[in-house]
Image (tube, rainbow, N blue to C red):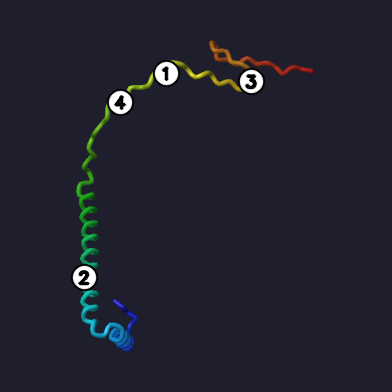
Amino acid sequence: MLPNLGPMEMIIVMGIAVLLFGKRLPEVGRSLGKGIVEFKKGLSDVTSGLDDASISSYSSPYQSAPKTYDAPKAEATYTEAAPKFEVPGAASTTAATGAVEYQPPASN
């Protein structure tokens, strides 16, 4: 767990723990141990839950998605058309032929 702690460092840490906690040291050790055990249980529960979810999602890759189709919505009908866009200053268009009338610029 702590790879860089040698025997001398462990003795120093234990000495500091005895000085800080004294008579309460067994109680503190017990609560610390319970906390570590609960943490490991929670961690294993989460990893097993993720494993179960990933296994169930990949268990049937060829299963098709449920087919639920909604009825197509009725298309809206418009009562008035939008005015035709005309570029200001441009030549007007003829609706029947679709051709654009060319008007040469006025010469001075």
Q: Residue at x 31, y 83 (%)?
A: 20
Quarter that holds the C terminus: top right
Q: Identity of the amino acid at label 4? A: Pro
Which comes sooner in the sequence, label 2 or label 3? 2
Above/below status of 1 relative to 107: below
Q: Residue at x 24, y 56 (%)?
A: 50
Using the image, tell me which numbered label, if any, was put on residue 37: 2
Q: Residue at x 52, y 18 (%)?
A: 83
Q: CA distance from mark 4 to mark 2?
A: 57 Å
Q: Please identify, in this view, whether the residue under mark 4 or under mark 2 is nearer the observer.
A: 2
Above/below status of 40 relative to 48: below
Please state which of residues 32 and 66 is positioned toward the viewer in this rendering: 32
Q: Identity of the amino acid at label 3? A: Ala
How many circles with numbers are drawn on the protein?
Answer: 4
Q: CA distance from mark 4 to mark 3?
A: 42 Å
Using the image, tell me which numbered label, if any, was put on residue 90: 3
Query: Pointer 4: what residue?
Result: 72
Which comes sooner in the sequence, label 4 or label 3? 4
Q: Secondary structure at mark 3?
A: loop
Q: Identity of the amino acid at label 2? A: Val
Q: CA distance from mark 4 to mark 1?
A: 18 Å
Q: Residues within 10 Å of mark 2 (few under 14, many from 20)?
A: few
Q: Residue at x 23, y 40 (%)?
A: 64
Q: Are marks 4 and 3 in contact (CB under 8 Å)?
A: no
Q: Residues within 10 Å of mark 3 (few under 14, many from 20)?
A: few
Which comes sooner in the sequence, label 4 or label 2? 2
